[in-house]
Image: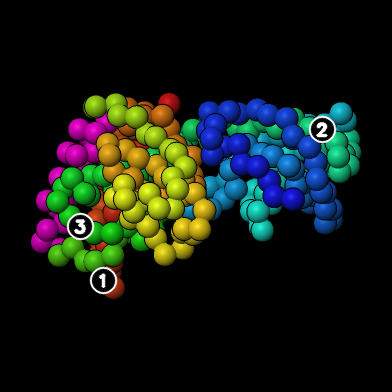
């Protein structure tokens, strides 16, 4: 049984009920699989959610979440009680961590907008939205003599987009429509089923991550550094203060 991903359609939902479908015990570590979840599994350059699963007697601390074969694996430690397959449980995630992760991920997408608006046609190949130095990598070099001016143009565009407080919209798009809306589609995105696309100011990108509601929530986003290596360009960024 696959796990229904509630965070895709309801990223601001932080508590839900679900049913246990499987429990695996390995030493002191336990893995719980559910029929539905709000926990984001690590992937797409974004860290996982953490939080708590509670049952009639169960108190389970989730500290790692991954996805395999359509099932979301909630890993962690049982603090109290027990649970069995078929039991009803309640899920709650760490809201501050979710918002922080979402803001960093949205910041990466805002950087894509800024790169386009700055007149560069570089295609993003990788996003890393972890706290130890988030960045976006682009295919193609930027000469060293142009990097300072590009960083300034990117920052101006980011500041402008933030000041407009534009909505960040995520929606499922049919395969036939994905390229029609102008989205760059990476090779690993399956086009035999609907694709989730995130759009900011008319610029769309396939994405399965969580995001904040608007660009106004990204105040303090700064372009830190631009460097090119082996034909690719990495743009590092930071968000000074995340509410």
User: Observer-nearest residue: 98 or 191?
Assistant: 191
Reading the image, the residue beneath label 2 is 88
Report whether 153 appears left or right of 132. Answer: left
- Label 1 or label 2, whichever lies nearer to me, is 2
Name the residue tied to disc 3: 121
How many C-alpha atoms fall within 10 Å of the one at disc 3: few (<14), some, or many (≥20)?
A: few
Residue situated in front as seen by the camera: 15 or 78: 15
Residue in view at x 78 percent, y 37 percent: 19
Q: CA distance from mark 3 to mark 2?
A: 50 Å
- Closer to the eye: label 3 or 1: 3
Query: Could you tell me residue 125's position as x and y percent?
Result: 36, 61
At x 43%, y 32%, the residue is 212
**Mark 2 residue element:** strand
Residue 140 placement: quadrant? bottom left
The x and y percentages for residue 208 are 49, 47
Measured along the vertical axis of the image, is residue 215 above or below residue 225? above
Tag 3 near tag 1, CB within 8 Å? no
Segment colored magenta: 144-162
Magenta stretch: residue 45 in it? Answer: no
Q: Earlier in the sequence, mark 1 or mark 2?
A: 2
Left or right: 5 as drawn, with respect to 54: left
Q: Which mark is residue 72?
A: none
Predominant SS of the magenta segment = helix
Secondary structure, mark 3, is loop
* Residue at point 69%, 39% (across, down): 36
The residue that disc 1 covers is: 231
How far apart marks 3 and 1 lie (CA) works out to 14 Å
């Amino acid at each position: 049984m696959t796990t229904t991903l509630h965070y895709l359609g309801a990223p601001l939902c932080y508590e839900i009920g679900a049913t246990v479908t499987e429990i695996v015990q390995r030493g002191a570590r336990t893995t719980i699989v559910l029929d539905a979840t709000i926990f984001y599994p690590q992937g797409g350059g974004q860290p996982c959610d953490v939080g708590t699963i509670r049952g009639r007697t169960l108190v389970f601390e989730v500290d790692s979440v991954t996805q395999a074969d359509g099932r979301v694996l909630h890993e962690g430690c049982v603090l109290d009680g027990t649970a069995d397959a078929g039991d009803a449980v309640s899920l709650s995630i760490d809201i501050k961590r979710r918002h922080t992760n979402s803001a960093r991920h949205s910041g990466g997408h805002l950087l894509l907008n800024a790169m386009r608006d700055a007149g560069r046609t570089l295609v993003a190949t990788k996003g890393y939205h972890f706290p130890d130095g988030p960045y976006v990598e682009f295919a193609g070099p930027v000469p060293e003599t142009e990097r300072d001016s590009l960083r300034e143009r990117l920052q101006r565009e980011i500041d402008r987009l933030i000041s407009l407080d534009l909505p960040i919209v995520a929606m499922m798009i049919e395969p036939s429509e994905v390229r029609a809306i102008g989205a760059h589609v990476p090779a690993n995105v399956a086009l035999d089923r609907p694709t989730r696309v995130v759009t900011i100011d008319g610029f769309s990108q396939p994405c399965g991550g969580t995001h904040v509601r608007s660009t106004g929530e990204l105040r303090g986003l700064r372009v830190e550094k631009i460097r090119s290596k082996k034909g690719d360009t990495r743009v590092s960024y930071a968000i000074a203060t995340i509410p």
